[in-house]
């Protein structure tokens, strides 16, 4: 006789390599979360800033003035390369969140984003709700400043969940 008396229950199987819930994971510390975010931001800026530096150097070399209508093509190219590199890193971070629940910074600090019921996050929860919604709120004049402040200060609550965590019903835990 099967262990489950309900013949209509969905089959339960543990699939090798499938993302499984992280049972009773320990919440990440505030400082660890901050450190991971700083690492992610430094990586993003590290790929973008060289393009800006090259653009500035080219602008100064070209003798562009403040009233020039158009930037020289090499300057636009340098900015474009920096922007494309930034988008590449950002897309990779989104991929990591979607597939592992981690960004590069979270991997370094051994943290993981999971749903509040310890299930893995996907693209909608990990990227759209956690990142895009809050970024859209922050783009609204005045409301954006308040949203940024509230998002940051909510980490000091007992659950250590920020506004973006509440929107996406996620939490950040220590990875095993």
Image: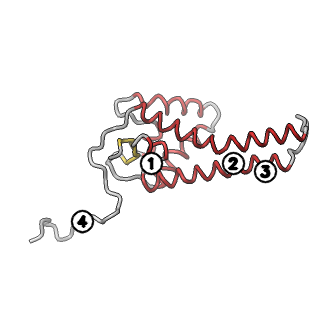
The residue to which callout 3 is attached is: 77
Residue occupying the point 46% across, 37% down? 163
The residue to which callout 1 is attached is: 102
In-front residue for pair 46/13: 46
Q: Residues within 10 Å of mark 1 (few under 14, many from 20)?
A: many
Residue occupying the point 30% across, 39% down? 26
User: Dots 4 and 2: beta carbons under 8 Å?
Assistant: no
Among numbered discs 4 and 2, the one appearing first in the sequence: 4
Disc 2 and disc 3: Cα gap in Å?
10 Å
In the shown orientation, is residue 28 left or right of residue 34? left
Among the 4 quarters of the image, the one containing residue 162 = top left
**Disc 1 element:** loop
Among numbered discs 3 and 1, the one appearing first in the sequence: 3
Among the 4 quarters of the image, the one containing residue 48 = top right
The residue to which callout 2 is attached is: 83
Q: Residues within 10 Å of mark 4 (few under 14, many from 20)?
A: few
Q: Nearer the viewer, mark 4 or mark 2?
A: 2
User: Dots 3 and 4: beta carbons under 8 Å?
Assistant: no
Q: Position of residue 108 (x, y in %)?
A: 44, 42
The residue to which callout 4 is attached is: 12
Disc 4 and disc 1: Cα gap in Å?
27 Å
Q: Position of residue 46 (x, y in %)?
A: 63, 41
């Amino acid at each position: 006789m099967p262990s489950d008396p309900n013949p209509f229950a969905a089959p339960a199987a543990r699939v090798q390599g499938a993302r499984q819930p992280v049972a009773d994971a320990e919440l990440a510390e505030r400082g660890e979360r901050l450190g991971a975010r700083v690492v992610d931001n430094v990586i993003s800026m590290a790929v973008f800033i060289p393009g800006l530096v090259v653009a500035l150097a080219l602008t100064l070399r070209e003798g562009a003035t403040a009233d020039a209508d158009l930037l020289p093509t090499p300057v636009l190219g340098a900015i474009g390369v920096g922007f494309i590199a930034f988008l590449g890193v950002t897309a990779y971070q989104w991929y990591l969140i979607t597939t592992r629940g981690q960004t590069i910074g979270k991997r370094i600090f051994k943290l993981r984003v999971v749903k509040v019921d310890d299930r893995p996050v996907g693209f909608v929860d990990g990227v759209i709700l956690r990142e895009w919604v809050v970024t859209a709120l922050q783009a609204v004049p005045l409301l954006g400043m308040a949203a940024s402040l509230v998002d940051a200060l909510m980490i000091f609550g007992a659950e250590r969940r920020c506004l973006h965590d509440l929107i996406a019903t996620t939490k950040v835990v220590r990875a095993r």
